[in-house]
Amino acid sequence: MNEQELRKRLELLRSEHRDLDVAIVALSEAGEKGGFVDQLQIARLKKRKLQLKDRISLIEDNLIPDIIA
């Protein structure tokens, strides 16, 4: 992948990461208001969010050159 493709992929991953964050908060708040909370679903969303964070970090590492101080 070239730099432009990596940057586009990075933005998509960041967007999905933010969307998952919103979904996790919404599910958690629903539980606080007396609604049914699917803890397994929340755990899966958190796991997916962590996977995305790892992928984001890998792409960022590829885009940012190593600078020896």
Image (cartoon, grey):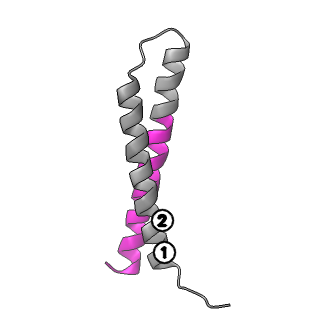
Q: Mark 2 = which residue?
A: 57
Separation of residues labelled 1 and 2 (CA atoms): 6 Å
Would you name the residue on which mark 1 appears?
Answer: 61
* Main secondary-structure element of the magenta-colored stretch: helix
The type of residue carrying mark 2 is Ser
Confirm whether the magenta stretch covers residue 62. Answer: no
- Magenta residues, start to end: 1-22
Please check the rendered image and state whether residue 6 is part of the magenta-colored stretch, yes or no: yes
Along the line of sight, the residue nearer the viewer: 18 or 28 = 28
Location of residue 19 in the rendering, given as x and y in whole percent from the top left corner = 45, 42
**Quadrant in which the C terminus is drawn:** bottom right
Which residue: 50% across, 36% down? 22
Residue at 41% over, 54% down: 52
| As drawn, 34 above or below 49 | above
| Occupied quadrant, residue 1 | bottom left
Q: Is residue 58 above or below residue 30?
A: below
